[in-house]
Image: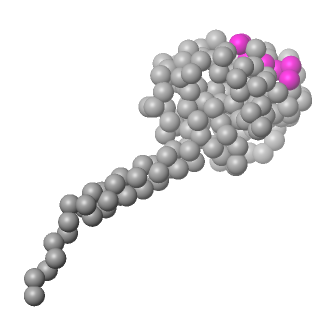
C-alpha cells in the first residue's frame, strides 16, 4: 500500500497558519511587553527639555519647592508623594529624580501642553507619530523614546483621554 504524499495545498495551508499564529502571538507579546522592548521599533524623539510642571528628570529632590513626603520603599527606588497625585522616584541612596508620574493634576503639563485629560489626538499632534503602543493593567499606553538622552515619556489612556503621564530615565524598571 502506497502512502499518500502531503499535497502542496496542505503544505501551503500549514505554513500560512503557522506564520499567522506566530505573527499574532508576537503582536500580543508586544502589546503586553515591558516598555523597553518597544524602543527599537520607533524613531528617537528629543525629550531632553521635557518636564512635567516644574519638575525635570535628574533634578535634585532638594530643589523642589515643596518638600516631598516619602512613600513606599521598593528594592531599587525610593518614591515620594507630592501634591495633587504626583509621585517622583529616586534610586536608593541618591536624590536625583529618575521618575515622575502625574495621576490627576491637570496643571502639571508637559512642555508641549499635554496634561491629564488631553485627548489622544492632541497628544499625537503635539508629539508626532513616532510612538509605540502597548498595554498594561487594561490600559492603552502611547510612549515616546529619547534614545540619545535615555528617556521615556508615556501617556496612559482611558477612553482616548490621557489618564496618567509617566516620564523616566529609560533604565527604570517598573
Rendered residue at 79%/24% (across/down): 118
Q: Give the x, y percent position of residue 146.
A: 53, 21
* Left or right: 84 in relation to 90: right
Q: Give the x, y percent position of residue 115.
A: 79, 22
Vertical order, 6 against 119 (above or below): below
The secondary structure that dominates the magenta segment is loop
Rendered residue at 81%/27% (across/down): 116
* Left or right: 35 in relation to 161: left
115 or 173, which is in the foreground?
115
Vertical order, 135 against 143 (above or below): below
Start-end of magenta stretch: 106-112
Residue 4 located within the stretch drawn in magenta: no
* Left or right: 99 in relation to 129: right
Extreme residue toward the left, this view: 1
Q: Give the x, y percent position of residue 108.
A: 82, 20
Vertical order, 53 against 168 (above or below): above
* Residue 164 visible (yes or no): no
Q: Give the x, y percent position of residue 137.
A: 70, 49
Amino acid at each position: 500500500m502506497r502512502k499518500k504524499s502531503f499535497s502542496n495545498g496542505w503544505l501551503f495551508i500549514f505554513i500560512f497558519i503557522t506564520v499567522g499564529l506566530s505573527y499574532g502571538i508576537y503582536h500580543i507579546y508586544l502589546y503586553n511587553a515591558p516598555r523597553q522592548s518597544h524602543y527599537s521599533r520607533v524613531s528617537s524623539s528629543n525629550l531632553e527639555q521635557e518636564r512635567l510642571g516644574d519638575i525635570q528628570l535628574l533634578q535634585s529632590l532638594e530643589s523642589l519647592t515643596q518638600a516631598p513626603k516619602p512613600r513606599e520603599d521598593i528594592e531599587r527606588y525610593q518614591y515620594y508623594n507630592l501634591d495633587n497625585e504626583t509621585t517622583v522616584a529616586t534610586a536608593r541612596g541618591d536624590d536625583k529624580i529618575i521618575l515622575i508620574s502625574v495621576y490627576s493634576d491637570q496643571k502639571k503639563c508637559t512642555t508641549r501642553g499635554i496634561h491629564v485629560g488631553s485627548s489622544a489626538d492632541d497628544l499625537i499632534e503635539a508629539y508626532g507619530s513616532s510612538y509605540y503602543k502597548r498595554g498594561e493593567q487594561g490600559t492603552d499606553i502611547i510612549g515616546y523614546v529619547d534614545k540619545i538622552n535615555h528617556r521615556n515619556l508615556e501617556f496612559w489612556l482611558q477612553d482616548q483621554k490621557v489618564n496618567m503621564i509617566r516620564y523616566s530615565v529609560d533604565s527604570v524598571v517598573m
